[in-house]
C-alpha cells in the first residue's frame, strides 16, 4: 500500500482501540498544556454554555447540562434509557456504508446524545469536544442530535488531540434530525495532529420549514479528512447550508463536501467552500439534487493556491429532475492577485503581512443565519491560523 | 524658496513590460508644496507615480529617486510607505473579506489618528464595516482611498486623477479631503507635499498647486504656473506644448 493510499484509506487495524487509552477520570487530570490546546479550539470553562460534553478517547469525562428542555447524555446511556432511539439509530447513515461505519457499529466508543424539546430555543451554544489523548488509538463515536418541533440549538464541536499526540484515528458517525420549524446550527472546529486521520460520517434529515446550518473549519496540519454528509430536505420550505473553511498544509489531504437532496417544494440549499492550499491537497465537492419543483440550490467553491505543491480540486455536481428548479454553481481556483498584495504594500504592509491578510479575508466567509457567537469563533480560529500561514 | 526638497527624481528611465515609458524624467518637489502633472493618456504620468511608490512591474533602468535625501530607488513599496510616501490609486482592487475598518487600523500603525472621527467627518462611517472597495461607486472609491491616506498620514502624497468618475457633489468632499491631506488650510509652514495627476484640472480649483508640469511621451516638456499651463492646454491642446518655447531644454 503506497503512502498516498494509506492517507486516503487509513486502516483501523493499524490503530489500537481507544478503550485501551490513558483515559482520565475527570477534567482535573488534564495538564495545563492540554488546557492550552483545548483553548485553541475554543474550549474555555468560563464561557457561557447551555451544556458541555467532553469525551477523551473512549470515555465521557464530563457531561453537564443547565437548562430545562435540553437533554445531553453519553449516547451509551441514552441507548439504555430510551427504546424509541431505534427510530433514529442508523437511519440517516447506512451502517454498512463502509468499513468505518461497520467498525463503529460493532464496537462503539460512546458519543453524545442531544435532544432539544419542542419549542425550546437555546440562547447559548452547547459545546462538545471529542479528544484523542493517547497516541495511536482509533476513536469511534456515534452522535445523535434531535431538534424537536420549533426548537433551536447551536452546537459547537471542537475536536483535537493531546499536544503530545501525533498519530490517531477519529471516526465520528453523526445523525441530525431537525423537526418542523426547528433550527440547528452545527459548527465544527478541528485542530488535529499531523498524523491524525478523520472520517466523519454524517446524515441529516430536515422537516418542513426546518433549518440546518453546518460549518466545518480545519486550518492545521492533519493526515487526512474525508467527509461527505448526506442531507435530506424532506419537508416543504426546509433549508440547509453547508460551509467549509479549510487550509491544506503540506502533507494534508482534505476531501470535503456535502450532498443535499431537495425532496420537497420550496426547499433551499447552499454549499459554500473556501479552501487554501499551502502545499496540501484539498478536494471540494458538492452535490445538489433537485427532486421537487420550486427548489433553489446553489453551490460555490473557491480555492486559493499559495504554493506550486499540492492541489485544489473543485468538483461540483447538480442533478435536476423537475422543470421548475433554480440550481447553480460557481467554482474558481487561483492564486492571490499580485495587484492586491501591492495595494496593501503601498499602505505599509510587508509582502507576508499582505498575503496573510488577504488569505484571512478569503477565509472569512459569512454564512447567513449563523449566530454571531459562532461566527466569532470561526473568525477567531482563522485569525489565529493566519499567524502560521 | 530655500525649502528642503522632499522628493527628487533624477534622470529617471523606466521600463514597463519591456517597453520604455519614462525617458529621463527629473523633478524636485520641495517640502510643503503641491505640484500638478498634466499630460495625455499614455504619456507616462501614472508610470511616474507607480515608480515613485516602488511597484515591481516598473523597472528603473537608469536614474534615482530620493525622498528626504535618502536614495529609495531600490526599496520595496512598504518600506517607502513607512518612510512617509502614500499613493491614491485610480482603480484600487477589492480586498474581499477584509473590512475597511480593519485595513485602516493597519494603515494607522501607531500614529493615533482616530478612524471613527475622520470617517464621520467625511460622511464615510457607513463604509467602515464593508469589505475594502467592494461594490463601491466611483466617488466612494476615491473617498475610501483618501480616508486610508488620511489615516496613513504620509508626508508625500501621490494622487492619480483624484477627480475621475466623481460627480460635482462628491468632488467638493474629495477636494476637502485632499486639502486636509496636504494641510492646505493651515497657516503654519506646511510639511506635506503632493504630486497630483489631473486630466480635467477641476481638482485644482479645490487644491491649488504651486507648480505644473506637462509630460509628453515619457519626458517633462514644460514646467510653470499650473493655472496658466492648464488654460493653455484647454485652449490649444497638447500640440501647442510640443512646439512651446518654454520647453525645458536638457
Image (tube, helix red, strand yellow):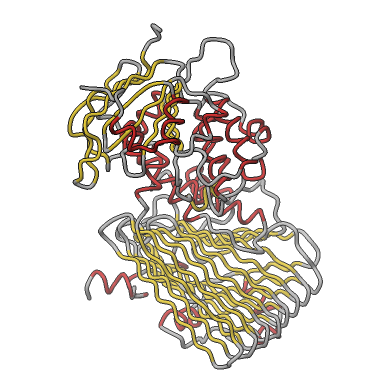
Residue nearer the viewer, B113 or B134: B134
**Between B61 and A23, the one nearer to me in the picture:** B61
Q: Residue at x 35, y 31 (%)?
A: B214
Tell me: residue A97, above or below residue B18. below
Instruction: Count the marks.
Output: 0
User: Which residue is nearer to you in this view: A68 or A337?
Assistant: A337
Left or right: A152 as drawn, with respect to B140: right
Residue located farthest toward the top when viewing the structure as drawn: B2
At a point 50% along the width and 43% down the height, the residue shown is: B164
Quadrant (top left, top right, bottom left, bottom right) of the N terminus of chain A: bottom left
With respect to residue B109, does A334 lie above or below? below
- Which quadrant of the figure has residue B25? top left
Q: Is residue A233 left or right of residue A384?
A: right
Q: Quadrant of residue B128?
A: top right
Across and down, in percent, residue B57 comes to 27, 43
Residue A123 vs residue A313: left or right? right
Quarter of the view holding residue B188: top right
Give the camera-side residue of B69 and A99.
B69
The vertical placement of B26 against A39, above or below, is: above
Please tell me whether residue A42 is drawn above or below residue A224 in the rendered image: above
The structure residue drawn at horizontal position 37% and vertical position 53%, both measured from the top left corner, is A336
- Give residue A364's position: percent from left, percent from top: 52, 54
Amino acid at each position: 500500500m503506497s503512502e498516498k493510499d494509506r492517507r486516503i484509506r487509513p486502516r483501523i487495524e493499524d490503530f489500537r482501540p481507544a478503550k485501551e487509552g490513558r483515559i482520565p477520570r475527570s477534567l482535573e487530570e488534564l495538564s495545563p498544556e492540554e488546557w492550552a490546546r483545548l483553548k485553541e479550539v475554543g474550549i474555555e470553562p468560563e464561557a457561557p454554555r447551555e451544556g458541555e460534553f467532553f469525551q477523551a478517547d473512549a470515555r465521557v469525562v464530563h457531561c453537564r447540562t443547565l437548562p430545562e428542555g435540553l437533554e445531553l447524555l453519553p449516547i451509551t446511556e441514552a441507548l439504555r434509557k430510551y427504546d424509541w432511539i431505534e427510530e433514529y439509530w442508523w437511519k440517516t447513515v447506512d451502517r454498512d456504508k463502509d468499513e468505518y461505519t461497520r467498525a463503529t457499529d460493532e464496537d462503539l466508543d460512546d458519543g453524545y446524545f442531544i435532544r432539544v424539546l419542542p419549542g425550546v430555543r437555546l440562547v447559548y451554544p452547547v459545546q462538545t469536544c471529542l479528544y484523542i489523548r493517547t497516541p495511536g488509538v482509533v476513536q469511534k463515536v456515534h452522535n445523535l442530535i434531535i431538534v424537536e418541533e420549533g426548537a433551536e440549538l447551536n452546537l459547537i464541536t471542537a475536536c483535537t488531540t493531546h499536544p503530545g499526540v501525533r498519530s490517531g484515528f477519529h471516526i465520528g458517525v453523526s445523525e441530525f434530525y431537525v423537526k418542523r420549524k426547528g433550527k440547528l446550527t452545527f459548527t465544527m472546529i478541528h485542530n488535529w495532529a499531523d498524523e491524525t486521520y478523520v472520517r466523519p460520517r454524517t446524515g441529516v434529515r430536515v422537516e418542513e420549514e426546518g433549518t440546518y446550518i453546518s460549518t466545518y473549519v480545519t486550518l492545521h496540519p492533519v493526515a487526512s479528512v474525508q467527509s461527505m454528509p448526506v442531507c435530506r430536505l424532506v419537508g416543504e420550505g426546509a433549508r440547509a447550508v453547508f460551509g467549509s473553511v479549510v487550509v491544506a498544509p503540506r502533507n494534508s489531504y482534505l476531501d470535503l463536501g456535502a450532498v443535499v437532496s431537495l425532496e420537497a417544494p420550496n426547499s433551499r440549499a447552499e454549499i459554500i467552500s473556501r479552501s487554501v492550499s499551502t502545499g496540501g491537497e484539498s478536494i471540494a465537492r458538492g452535490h445538489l439534487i433537485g427532486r421537487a419543483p420550486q427548489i433553489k440550490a446553489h453551490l460555490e467553491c473557491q480555492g486559493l493556491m499559495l504554493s506550486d505543491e499540492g492541489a485544489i480540486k473543485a468538483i461540483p455536481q447538480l442533478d435536476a429532475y423537475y422543470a421548475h428548479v433554480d440550481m447553480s454553481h460557481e467554482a474558481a481556483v487561483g492564486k492571490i492577485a499580485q495587484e492586491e498584495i501591492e495595494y496593501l504594500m503601498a499602505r505599509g504592509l510587508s509582502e507576508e503581512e499582505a498575503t496573510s491578510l488577504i488569505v484571512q479575508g478569503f477565509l472569512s466567509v459569512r454564512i447567513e443565519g449563523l449566530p454571531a457567537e459562532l461566527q466569532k469563533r470561526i473568525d477567531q480560529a482563522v485569525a489565529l491560523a493566519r499567524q502560521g500561514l | 524658496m530655500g525649502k528642503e526638497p522632499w522628493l527628487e527624481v533624477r534622470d529617471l528611465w523606466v521600463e514597463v513590460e519591456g517597453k520604455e515609458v519614462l525617458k529621463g524624467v527629473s523633478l524636485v518637489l520641495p517640502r510643503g508644496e503641491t505640484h500638478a502633472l498634466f499630460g495625455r493618456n499614455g504619456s507616462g504620468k501614472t508610470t511616474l507615480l507607480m515608480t515613485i511608490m516602488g511597484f515591481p512591474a516598473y523597472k528603473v533602468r537608469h536614474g534615482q529617486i530620493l525622498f528626504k535625501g535618502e536614495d529609495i530607488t531600490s526599496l520595496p513599496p512598504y518600506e517607502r510607505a513607512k518612510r512617509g510616501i502614500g499613493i491614491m490609486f485610480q482603480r484600487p482592487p477589492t480586498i474581499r473579506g477584509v473590512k475597511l475598518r480593519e485595513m485602516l487600523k493597519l494603515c494607522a500603525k501607531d500614529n493615533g489618528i482616530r478612524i471613527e472621527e475622520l470617517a464621520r467627518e467625511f460622511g464615510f462611517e457607513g463604509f467602515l464595516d464593508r469589505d475594502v472597495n467592494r461594490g463601491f461607486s466611483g466617488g466612494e472609491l476615491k473617498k475610501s482611498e483618501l480616508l486610508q491616506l488620511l489615516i496613513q498620514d504620509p508626508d508625500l502624497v501621490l494622487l492619480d486623477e483624484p477627480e475621475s468618475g466623481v460627480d460635482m457633489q462628491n468632488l467638493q468632499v474629495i477636494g476637502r479631503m485632499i486639502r486636509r491631506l496636504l494641510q492646505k488650510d493651515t497657516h503654519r509652514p506646511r510639511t506635506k507635499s503632493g504630486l497630483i495627476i489631473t486630466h480635467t484640472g477641476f481638482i485644482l480649483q479645490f487644491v491649488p498647486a504651486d507648480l505644473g508640469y506637462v509630460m509628453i511621451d515619457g519626458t517633462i516638456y514644460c514646467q510653470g504656473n499650473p493655472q496658466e499651463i492648464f488654460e493653455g492646454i484647454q485652449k490649444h491642446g497638447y500640440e501647442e506644448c510640443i512646439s512651446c518655447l518654454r520647453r525645458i531644454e536638457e
